[in-house]
Image (cartoon, rainbow, N blue to C red):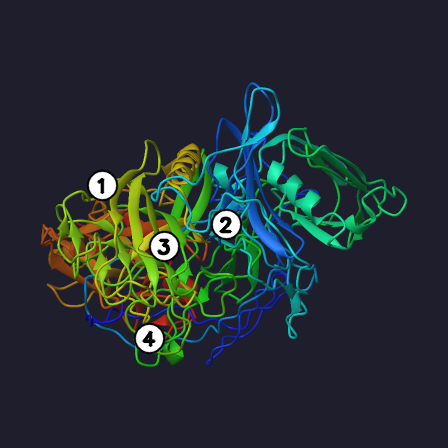
Amino acid sequence: MSTRTSASTPTASTSMATTSSVSESTSPHASTPTSLPTGPSTESTSSGATTSGVTSKGTSSETLMSEPTATSTRSTTTISGSSTSVNTSKSPSSGATTSLSSATTSMSGSGTSLVTPTSESTSQTSPVTPSSQSTRQTQSTSPTSFITPTSQSTSPTSGVNTPTTGSGTSISTSKATSSGVTTPMSGPSTLSDTPSSQSTSPASFVTPTSPSTNPTSGVTTPTTGSGTSVNHVYYRIWHQPSIDVYRIHVLLYQRIWHHVWIAIYRVHVPVILILLLLDRKVNNVSLYINNFFNRPILVPINLSQHCHDVQQQQQLQFQHAFKYQQLKFKHKYDSFQQQQQQQQQFVQLNNIFVSRGHFYSMRRLYQVIRGSDNAVRDITALSPGGVANAAAQDTFCANTTCLISIIYDQSGYGNHLTQAPPISNGYDGPEANGYDHLASAIGAPVLLNGQKAYGVFIPPGTGYRNIVPSGIATGDSPQGIYTVVDGTHYNDDFCFTYGNAQITPTDSGGGTMEALYFGSDGFSGSGAGSGPWPMADFGNGLYTANTSTQNPALPSITNRFFTGILKGRPGNWALRGGDATSGALTTYYNGSRPAGFDPLNKQGGIILGIGNNNINFGQGTFYEGVLTSGYPRTSIDNQVQANINAAGYKIAPLVSGPPLTVGGTISIQLTTPGFDTRYLAHAGTAQVTTEVVTAASSLTLRQQASWTVRQGLGNAGCYSFESRDIPGSYLRQTGFLLYVDANDNSKGFGEDATFCTQAGFNGKGVSIRSWEYPTRFVRHQNNLGYIASNGGVENFDAAGAFSNDTSFLVNAAWA
């Protein structure tokens, strides 16, 4: 969103110093923004051999744009200079393959790898120290988790080439028959399901253009001709591809020392047809096979020699019969060395076996920065295809705070999300120089099939952005978005969004973005009830249909975990959603765009948690998301939803350390040396203070320093603290200052008054975290109570004595 003002939110956050590419590097707090490198990585959390594969479940990987039939296997393959997404499905009776051309995709997410080969280019965003601001209010926020993607392109320093695109058309649709031969299918499907770029004619290709190299990073990036490109931006908290349709069906996974073997059953007939068309015409085809790993497989194929010279082609055998014959292709390439190990590679386009290359056994999903020393660490997966290594994060962040400094793009295009910068004629963030806050690394714990991970809990003032994107849809080009969010964490303000936004440093106005919003702001559209709802943010408007009226087909969302889908193409857009834990998707709208937003003029930037003009008053929790360049089919949406259902999202505990008893009465004693005879107390509705309390103190003072533990008013997984001397009044934050106020039963008050406990930072008792602002903890300073970050813009955020000032002993109540 762009054009709407809102009351500013409390602002403060931990300042970030320069992060180093070496593991657990340290640097002093910086007073000015410093760059966050996204290149080779900081300390890895992975363990075991450095090979990457898939889960033992053997889930499939397909391109986002392809329509599956029967048991389908999909891989995204960039051939020669044309990056065209192709898929193949196998007929149960015949074994023949069917394929559908698909629109290009750009996937992003915090975790699962999708299928796009390319060199990863880094984007840097400068972290900075926060600016001072403190206003009393009642807004709230919540966390999100990451999922590891399967396929990742090379790191910026690896120098692996990325695919180039020549001119070409989309691949013809084929259908398998019972006889085992491939026959053409009928023309394109209906408007609602067919990507706008789909064609039924066979692809023709010319010699690809040369890849371009980034002079600063040395990374070779794809260049495009008139053909289509396959782009994915994908962020997840788990390494297993979240979407069957994006995955290659891996039927066999076996670890043999330094070798990783993958059997990919039935690669697409269109790929083979392309190879036939390229025979004698293209001299050196680079076939990238995105094989459910972190990096593309690069297979040099010299078709100009007719693939007959086994010596020159390293035992390449190409056997095929055109048209109604089953096509087979086998390529053995066993002399390829890359960095750490020498491995073998076999490629057979009927049954592909791959073993070679330099892969990470667990791909980096996000980076955290530690408050105690500004060290950084990349968080990866527990195992190939597995969940993020939450235990490694917990160990790294023990006895201190951690922020999420980078959310890595899993597509290989390097569209990483970092601290959002200000917009000159838009909104400044609360940090120094107008940057937004970074999210807490522990605000949104979640269980994925029983394994703990963390999402991204975004309170007001927090946001991430990429303004130097690669491969993102621009103009009125087709695009698809899906996200998984916390359906109970929202507010009625702008703008908790994820999607395509402007890249300019100024507000470019309406129509320059296409992003998915979640919340209850009915500024220019709404659904039934009071919300929240998923809505399309086109810039200067939130829409649930093609007008600003209510869309009765869109209900208020009550799901704890919710899947939202927004997709658009010239003249048409659709809004879908459903329970992320079970069940099918519902289409809330499918039709024309609102007046003034057709065509769109998307700029191709990426935002998370903020609006186009950096408006940052919204809140929400992000677990995973994909941004595609291309229009996903309805059947693909449905397979995405089925895969998300299979991830097994469940609520994880929000509290740790010494437990509190709901209904019990307590006192809260300071542990800072020299102040450890003091307790948190209050007098009426004035700001909370610390007081020396003994058994000889007056009854009034002893009651003022005593609290009853209640179930959290804003989240039942945490606690609220009711005053013993004023029943019905609770400890709450407003403007980051602590008060005791009467409960007005509003959503905002409940979130202000909800706190989660964990083991004390200094090893004593507990530290008390604000659920609403999980980067902030109850702290005393100058005998007053606050919620403070570990080194932020406010005076009470000072890093000195933070661990002692935020650790408390929980004792029996004084009265």
Distance, label 4 to label 1, CA atoms, is: 34 Å
Question: Closer to the observer: label 2 or label 4?
Answer: 4
Of labels 1 and 3, earlier in sequence is 1
Q: Residues within 10 Å of mark 2 (few under 14, many from 20)?
A: some
Pick whichever of labels 3 and 2 is earlier in the sequence.
Answer: 2
Q: Amino acid at mark 2?
A: Asp
Q: Which residue is mark 4?
A: 508
Q: Position of residue 590 (x, y in %)?
A: 26, 46
Of mark 4 and mark 1, the one earlier in the sequence is 4
Count neighbours of disc 3 (C-alpha within 10 A) and say few if under 14, some if 14 to 19, many if 20 or more: many
Relative to 332, is 735 above or below?
below
Q: Quadrant of residue 479?
A: bottom left
Q: Which residue is mark 3?
A: 569
Rendered position, 67 above or below 407? above
Q: Amino acid at mark 3?
A: Arg
What amino acid type should be assigned to the residue bearing mark 4?
Ser
Measured in 3D between alpha carbons, the distance from the residue under mark 4 to the one under mark 3, in whole angstroms, is 21 Å
Name the residue tied to disc 1.
Answer: 558
Query: What whole-number distance in Å separates the C-alpha atoms at marks 1 and 3?
Result: 29 Å
